[in-house]
Amino acid sequence: MTHPPQGPIPLTLAVNGRELALHVAPWTTLLDLLRLHLDLTGTKKGCDHGQCGACTVLVDGTRINACLALAVMQDGKSVTTIEGLSRGDELHPLQAAFIEHDAFQCGYCTPGQICSAVGMLAEGHAEGPDDIREQMSGNICRCGAYPNIVRAIGEVMGAGR
Amino acid sequence: MRPFSYARPDSLDGALAELAGNQGAPDASAAPVRPVAGGTNLLDLMKADVMRPTRLVDITRLALRGITETGDGGLRLGALSTNAETAWDERVRARYPLLHKAILAGASAQLRNMATNGGNILQRTRCYYFYDTATPCNKRAPGSGCGALTGVNRIHAILGASEHCIATHPSDMAVALAALDATVRVAGPGGERAIPFADFHRLPGDTPHRETTLRPEEVVTAIDLPADNLARHSTYLKARDRASYAFALVSAAVALELEDGVVRGARLALGGVAHKPWRDRDAEALLVGKAPGRAAFAAVADAVLRDAKGHGHNTFKIGLARSVIVRAFEEAAGLEPS
């Protein structure tokens, strides 16, 4: 038994606080929806296979890989991308800490790193640098900025306790 | 990704109606209609063109989420509970620390937030040749041959393999579930049934494309953990190429029941070495009545690995497995690693 492909499916989604009514083909990933349909190119496509973490976003506050999520399966949910973290010109504390600690070189992995760190802090299972390294291991930095990434996150984590 | 159609039933009956047409498919993994929940493995394999379902059934609206008491001291893990929810559940941490540790040894935090318990045990091998559609693979294309047997096989099986397939099962969680004697609960057109974990995954034999005993028209609804006395002396030890976020070269889920300094019961399941989590109950029985210690643990390792066979690049796994088994048992027994 085979099934013919299906046309666009209605989808309601809150993206960075904005309620959207969309139509998407079932095979559209959340990552492609954000980048190609909504022009939110802050979320990066690295490997497109869930291995690098560059596409990390928050769905209902939980960090996931947008490349392995179908957009239609997010119906009714709330998505936060790197574009949605600041309040106007006031950076999110993690954004500010990444700048303060020089926690990047090329910057390609940075939106994913920061969204992942926001999710990790919300999960509340990390207590020190070793935990940060372990729980951030789904975000690869090819430039090797890891020491400063850990410092930046550690500073915000310490401030929150 | 090839185009497909999409359904989002809100009940188990609705999902089973969608899957009814799968009857007769050689394996659930090859059926034209596939349930999707976390999607972390399925979508990856669809992008690689390894899996080509024509319809996805989104089962995330089904009431299969949550971790509940079984009534006889065990826990029921909902098929749709995520790996993260399961690992961090306080009851899992207290009563099945081995499972907590195994789940957190696998994948990344993002993937564990997406991946479900049902999907975890149904995930497919990461064999390079299975993923590469330009190469032969008896699992992906039955009868085409095995690229790994004489190819690059560093990550491949040393136990229970066949001339048709030397792929390994990639899950960490499943290794713990094997050690804990879990039961997989599934639902199909004829009602529910329970599959002992040891019978859920198959060895490759001459049909490596048949991976589980789940029927193509069935869905996993839950995984049951029986009550046990294993929490105090148990651990999960994983040897891998990176400190985090890498598949196991060899892993061991071990548990001991100790009484007056003597082993009353022992469990050992190995990951990264076979087509399914590897249990050898005869080898485990060698520990019963013995005092825990390096010699006794080494004897178990030798028994488990008696028929282990390397294929060139992966031959180092035999010695590695021996070390991992001994050290895991030492950790579980509270002994200093020797």
Image (spheres, rainbow, N blue to C red):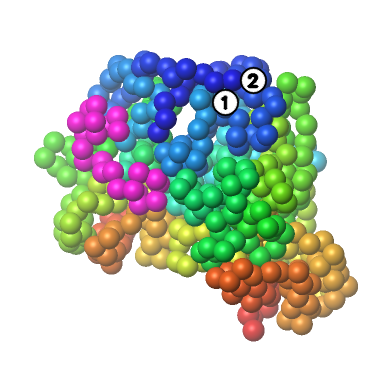
B19, above or below A65, in the image: above
Which SS class for mark 1?
strand
CA gap, disc 1 and disc 2: 8 Å
Residue type indicated by callout 1: Val
B231 with respect to A106 (left or right): right
B28, above or below B206, in the image: above
Whether pointer 1 and pointer 2 mark residues with C-beta atoms closer than 8 Å, the reply is: yes
Residue type indicated by callout 2: Gly
Q: Earlier in the sequence, mark 1 or mark 2?
A: 2
Magenta stretch: give its range: A32-53
* Residue positioned 22% across, 51% down in the render: A108
Residue linked to disc 1: B33
Q: Is residue A7 visible?
A: yes
Q: Quadrant of residue B331?
A: bottom right
Question: Which residue is at the front of the view, B193 or B255?
Answer: B193
B85, above or below B284, in the image: above
B291, above or below B76, in the image: below
Chain name for mark 2: B
Q: Quadrant of the N terminus of chain B?
A: top left
* Residue positioned 76% across, 49% down in the render: B198
Q: Quadrant of the C terminus of chain B?
A: bottom right
Instruction: Give the class, few, some or many, for how many residues have Cα within 10 Å of label 1's Cα (few <14, many ≥20).
Output: many
Which numbered circle lies on residue B21?
Answer: 2
Question: Which residue is at the front of the view, A25 or B14?
Answer: A25
